[in-house]
Amino acid sequence: MLSIENITHSIDAWLNSLFNPTVVLLVESLIVGLCVISLFAVLGLVLVLMERKVSAYMQIRLGPNRVGPGGSLQTVADTLKLAMKEGLTPDGADKFLFNLAPFVVIVVAMMILAPVAFAKGLQIWDLNIGVLYITAVSSLSVIGILMAGWASNNKYSLLGAMRSGAQIVSYELSAGISVISIVVLTGSLRIQDIIASQQDGWWLFKGHIPALLSFVIFIIAVTAETNRAPFDLAEAESELTAGFHTEYSGMKFALFFLAEYVNIFIVCAIAATLYLGGWMPLHIGHWAGFNRVMDYIPSSLWFMGKTFFLIFVIMWFRWTFPRLRIDQLLNLEWKYLLPISMVNLLLMTLIAIEGWYF
Amino acid sequence: MVFLSKMFLKKYISDVFGAVRSLLKGMRLTGYYFTHRKEIITQQYPDNKEEMKLPERFRGEVVMPHDERNEHACTGCTACELACPNGTIKIITKFDVTPEGKKKKAIDTFIYHLELCTMCNLCIEACPTDAIKMAQNFEHSVYDRSELTKKLNKPGSKIREGVE
């Protein structure tokens, strides 16, 4: 049977037959890097188009419908336009930090991609502390945002960056606690183990109400962490023009834009991995027949389907909810999400110790 | 232990549930719009020029309807000119002599500056005889600015019998 796992293994074997192990490692890193960059490009195009279409339909509009069939080439045209534009650096800016910031943001996004399992056997780096790695690296992106805001020498940018910092630092907590509650159930930080533990059902269903609660909290927290509406005060068009990337133009702006959408993809992929079983097909307990039918759908399709469903949910949030004020934002985290998720973690631990989950 | 009092917890929990309920309500509405394409109100303008339907209250420009005998309902009272916030309307009046030999105020020229008009509808509301109304036409581009200054009463028209 043709699967992605076999393809990667055959490429590995073929390269090993040609070169010595060091060269093979280098060539494979290069291939993986190219794959990641092309994945980023495709994700940027697809997600921006999806966002524009989803927002249009939710606002009783049509959305882009002129460039290409049904407007499908609109984002390609937009990217071309951005590539042609001049990348200005303002006079008063800290030139080095200003130009470095977009790359920091995009590199962090690339780094989080490493432990994500895209399909059965398709994972860049299956390290034994995958979940810890993800939570650790994802908080680095705030450095890029603060760098951009500070170096721009612009009030809007600085305000946006500060808000973003406060936001990411506080919401990291409840996101982390939600992740821990799944780790408590699986007893492992390795992504493959977490997926394997969902062989007979997803944690969202197996873990009763605490799992559902931690899933909801995780989705809220990552929406805030990716600076998306209703938590988009970091860029808040109506008050801060564009927040931390006000001064950016051309491809540097495009990198920020791309990083935003790639981050959404990544957090949704992680949510899908932790709560919806990653690439694991929908299995219900011991229904052998049903499980075998579900296994016929390729694992990559399962993963992409779950991830894009979650992305759709996050877009749904964006086009429904009004933006929070900064004090409301911090109230929500410190007074509601954090206490609830702590109590929830206790409940989850009780369930895990007593073995009440299915 | 104020923070653990029964009232506090009750309010806290009801706050959370109330928030979740109202957020889900909003999501249900946008979800309904997302799944029901027939609700889309966008007019694909240049493509549907023939069959395009504008809302009844759309305000395109001020016109003065004339009937088949070339008669209008304007008495020249200048209520519209006074109502206009930015000097779009200028009315030049004259005195007609009635058969009985009495002088009667009438309209000579109704000048309408489309280029100044903000389509605020105040003149139409001010008109006591419903002599002017808003038209649905909105394709106003011309090659010369002077074409936008319009004379609304047609040449040779006169006021309809019985309109005071």
Image (cartoon, coloured by chain):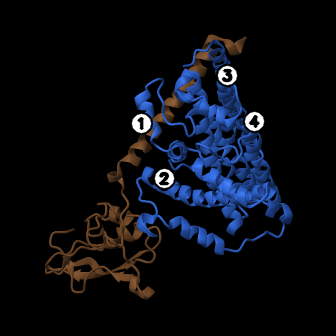
Chain colours: A blue, B brown
Looking at the picture, which amino acid does disc 3 mark? Answer: Leu
| B92 or A250: nearer the viewer | A250
**Residue identified by numbered label 2:** A55
Nearest-to-viewer mark from 3 and 4: 4
**Residue identified by numbered label 1:** A293
| Mark 4 and mark 2 on one chain | yes
Which numbered circle lies on residue A345?
3
Instruction: Tell me, yes or no, whether the two marked residues, 4 and 2, touch with CB atoms within 8 Å.
Output: no
Other-residue count near label 1 (Cα within 10 Å), few / some / many at <14 / 14–19 / ≥20? few
Q: Choose the circle earlier in sequence order: 3 or 4.
A: 4
C-alpha distance separating marks 3 and 2? 35 Å
| Mark 3 and mark 4 on one chain | yes
Indicate the chain on which mark 3 is placed.
Answer: A
**Residue identified by numbered label 4:** A129
Q: Residue furthest front?
A: A17
Q: Position of residue A156 (x, y in %)?
A: 73, 56
Nearest-to-viewer mark from 4 and 1: 1
Indicate the chain on which mark 1 is placed.
Answer: A
| A309 or B57: nearer the viewer | A309
Q: Choose the circle earlier in sequence order: 3 or 2.
A: 2
Q: How many numbered markers are drawn?
A: 4
Toward which corner of the image does residue A245 lie, by quadrant? bottom right
Residue A326 appears in view: yes
Looking at the picture, which amino acid does disc 1 mark? Answer: Val
Left-right relation of A82 to B57: right
Q: Choose the circle earlier in sequence order: 4 or 2.
A: 2
Q: Choose the circle earlier in sequence order: 4 or 1.
A: 4
Q: Choose the circle earlier in sequence order: 3 or 1.
A: 1
| Mark 1 and mark 2 on one chain | yes
